[in-house]
Image: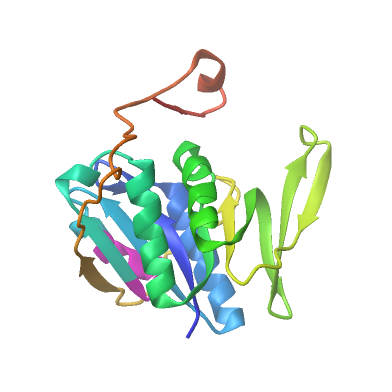
């Protein structure tokens, strides 16, 4: 059965709210589209965080836990998300449109041959077809977006979608092995800092 896969972003083992928003939306959509919401969690020492994702709607959580994955590495993270998506028959990939998500989403979309709608402020199903809305022209226009590719990728604007922690699923945790490949760690984020212009707007810059 096709599923909706959510990339779960964490920092120091704590799940980011934007990921819980995306997971809650995935579970909501899955209920109307006949799909399970599943999650992929990547990092180091993150196994314990996986157990809480069931209550936010995850039927299954794939965990890649390895010291080399402690910091965001774009190539490795994109490869692992894509690996799960292909092996599990994913139809839709969701993630938060955070600094990390804005970097990761297009990489995953390219690897999956998927269309991408970024920074969405609405995402709904109409007769099984996903319809997203996002701002354009500096917020002056709200664009309605549909994706026609077989696999679809959406990043969701943080602090727009509701978090639902009442699903109460067991959330099967699948520990997946990470086998580093050449080039996996050629680009690694060492720290996240607030830029002067972004600080007041709550944004962060990857460095």
Image x and y of residue 100, in percent: 44, 40
- Is 90 located above or below residue 50 in the figure? below
Query: Looking at the rendering, which quadrant does residue 154 occupy?
Result: bottom right
In the depicted view, which residue is nearer to us: 77 or 205?
77
Image location of residue 160, percent across then percent down: 60, 48
Q: What segment is highlighted magenta in the picture?
A: 50-60
Give the image's coloring scheme.
rainbow
Relative horizontal placement of residue 163, taking residue 53 as reference (left or right):
right
Tell which residue pokes out farthest to the right in this image. 141
The residue shown at (21%, 58%) is: 178
Q: Is residue 70 visible?
A: yes
Q: In which quadrant is the C terminus drawn?
A: top left
Q: Is residue 123 magenta?
A: no
Image location (x, y in percent) of residue 118: 63, 48
Using residue 10 as the reference point, say whether residue 85 is left or right of it.
right
Q: Main secondary structure of the magenta part?
A: helix
Is 120 left, or right, of 142 in this rendering?
Answer: left
Quadrant of the rendered image containing residue 25: bottom right
Specify whether residue 166 is in view: no
**Vertical arrangement, residue 205 with respect to residue 25, above or below:** above
Residue pictured at 29% horizontal, 77% vertical: 170
Give percent across and percent down for residue 47: 19, 58
Q: Residue furthest front?
A: 182
191 versus 61 height, above or below = above
């Amino acid at each position: 059965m096709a599923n909706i896969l959510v990339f779960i972003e964490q920092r120091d083992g704590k799940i980011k709210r934007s990921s819980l928003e995306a997971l809650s939306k995935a579970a909501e959509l899955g209920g109307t589209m006949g799909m399970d919401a599943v999650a992929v969690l990547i990092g180091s020492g993150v196994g314990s965080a996986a157990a809480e994702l069931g209550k936010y709607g995850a039927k299954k959580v794939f965990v890649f836990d390895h010291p080399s994955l402690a910091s965001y590495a774009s190539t490795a993270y994109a490869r692992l998300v894509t690996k799960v998506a292909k092996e599990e028959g994913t139809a839709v990939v969701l993630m938060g449109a955070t600094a990390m998500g804005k970097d990761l989403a297009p990489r995953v979309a390219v690897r999956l041959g998927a269309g991408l709608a970024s920074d969405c402020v609405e995402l709904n199903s109409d007769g099984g077809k996903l319809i997203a809305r996002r701002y354009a022209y500096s917020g002056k226009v709200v664009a309605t977006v549909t994706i026609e590719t077989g696999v679809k990728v959406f990043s969701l604007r943080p602090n727009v979608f509701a978090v639902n922690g009442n699903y109460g699923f067991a959330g099967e945790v699948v520990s997946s092995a990470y086998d580093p490949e050449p080039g996996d760690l050629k680009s690694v984020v060492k720290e996240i800092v607030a830029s002067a212009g972004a600080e007041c707007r709550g944004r962060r810059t990857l460095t």
